[in-house]
């Protein structure tokens, strides 16, 4: 009884800590940028309504950016946790199956073709990125299918190969369209500086329901952690579960890339930080990964605003800088096993 009570108390404390960190990160991200806002300025913007400079900065620039960062970070982190659970590999994230690369290819195609038509609420660039992620996942899945069955190892290898191939296609498109290299490079760096309420609403409308779908399968992920054969013997339809989880993950990744470009490493960092506190039990891990991803992306974006202001370092660059040393550590740690 004491052990169970102590475990619940520890879990509650961890949740309280991460939720507090989430709201503090939001406050910090709202405050700092090219123009700093004090807590009083934020309170005034909330109380006084439109008309002041502080209100314009807070409502039209800072708040949608912070909200988009929180939603995108949560989505990418949960995708990373799910990918690592499916493949039982701590170094897997959305890049592994080529989803991020596919979304980038779709966006690059939209840029180089100069298509300007609109889909209600989403630009053509966003639509192409979204279709690129889903299309790539579909191709990888069927490429690795043998007699109607898909093993995680073949899926993983197919994703890596397709990801490299897509990266080569993007490089070719950049070479053939030198006048648009700047736009392509900036997109691939990943940035939420252009956040608007429309982009935030679109992202939240897709990502939040998808995270609930991923969380719904925490039991199946726990069983799959013992291996696919063991999960099947426990009644889990592993093929159906993988299709649902991978398709839902591609929707999240495609949406994030469509509104913020390629933002890497959040799906790698956040699950590891969460796993340090909770272990591998997915009911806790998925929720804490989402919170950790939100905090990571918001703080990385804030740091990118502060280091070179009034200029900004794209958030995709900042997450790579932060994750690089951690990634090397994980490689060395796994190499010793």
Image: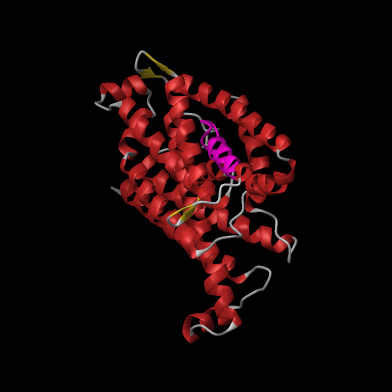
User: Taking 193 as reference, is 199 left or right?
Assistant: left
Q: Quadrant of residue 19?
A: bottom left
| Residue situated furthest left in the rendering | 235
Q: Quadrant of the C terminus?
A: top right
Frontmost residue, 334 versus 198: 198
Residue 313 magenta: no
Frontmost residue, 139 versus 148: 139
Q: Quadrant of residue 166?
A: top right
Q: Percent from the top left, x then y, of residue 332?
A: 65, 30
Q: Percent from the top left, x then y, of residue 322?
A: 66, 47
Q: Percent from the top left, x then y, of residue 252?
A: 45, 45
Identify the residue at image location x=43%, y=29%.
138
Identify the residue at image location x=37%, y=55%.
9
Frontmost residue, 30 versus 114: 114
Q: Percent from the top left, x then y, of residue 172?
A: 69, 32
Q: Quadrant of residue 243?
A: top left
Rendered position, 165 above or below 255: above
Frontmost residue, 58 versus 124: 124
Rendered position, 116 above or below 21: above
Give the dominant element type of the magenta stretch: helix, strand or loop.
helix
Q: Is residue 222 visible?
A: no
User: Taking 270 as reference, is 2 left or right?
Assistant: left
User: Taking 140 as reference, is 322 left or right?
Assistant: right
Residue 97 magenta: yes
Q: Is residue 111 visible?
A: yes
The span shown in magenta is: 95-110
Identify the residue at image location x=45%, y=19%.
144
């Amino acid at each position: 009884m004491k052990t169970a009570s102590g475990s619940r108390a520890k879990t509650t404390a961890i949740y309280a800590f991460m939720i507090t960190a989430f709201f503090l990160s939001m406050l910090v991200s709202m405050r700092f940028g090219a123009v700093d806002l004090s807590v009083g300025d934020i309170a005034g913007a909330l109380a006084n309504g439109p008309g002041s400079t502080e209100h314009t900065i807070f409502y039209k620039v800072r708040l949608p950016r912070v909200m988009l960062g929180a939603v995108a970070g949560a989505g990418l982190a949960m995708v990373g946790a799910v990918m690592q659970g499916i493949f039982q590999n701590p170094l897997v994230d959305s890049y592994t199956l080529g989803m991020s690369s596919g979304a980038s290819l779709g966006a690059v195609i939209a840029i180089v073709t100069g298509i300007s038509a609109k889909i209600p609420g989403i630009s053509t660039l966003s639509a192409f990125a979204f279709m690129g992620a889903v299309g790539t996942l579909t191709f990888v899945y069927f490429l690795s299918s043998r007699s109607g069955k898909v093993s995680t190892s073949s899926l993983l290898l197919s994703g890596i190969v397709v990801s490299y191939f897509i990266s080569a296609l993007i490089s070719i498109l950049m070479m053939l369209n030198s006048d648009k290299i700047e736009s392509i490079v900036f997109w691939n760096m990943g940035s939420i500086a252009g956040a608007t309420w429309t982009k935030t609403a679109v992202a939240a409308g897709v990502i939040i329901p998808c995270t609930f779908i991923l969380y719904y399968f925490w039991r199946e992920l726990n069983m799959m952690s013992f291996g696919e054969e063991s999960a099947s013997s426990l009644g889990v339809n592993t093929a159906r579960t993988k299709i649902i989880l991978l398709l839902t993950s591609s929707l999240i990744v495609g949406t994030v890339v469509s509104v913020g470009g390629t933002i890497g490493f959040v799906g790698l960092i956040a699950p590891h930080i969460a796993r340090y506190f909770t272990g591998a039990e997915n009911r806790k891990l998925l929720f804490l990964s989402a919170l950790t991803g939100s905090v990571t992306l918001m703080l990385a974006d804030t740091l990118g605003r502060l280091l070179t202001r009034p200029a900004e370092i794209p958030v995709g660059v900042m997450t790579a800088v932060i994750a690089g040393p951690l990634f090397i550590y994980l490689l060395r740690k796994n190499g010793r096993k």
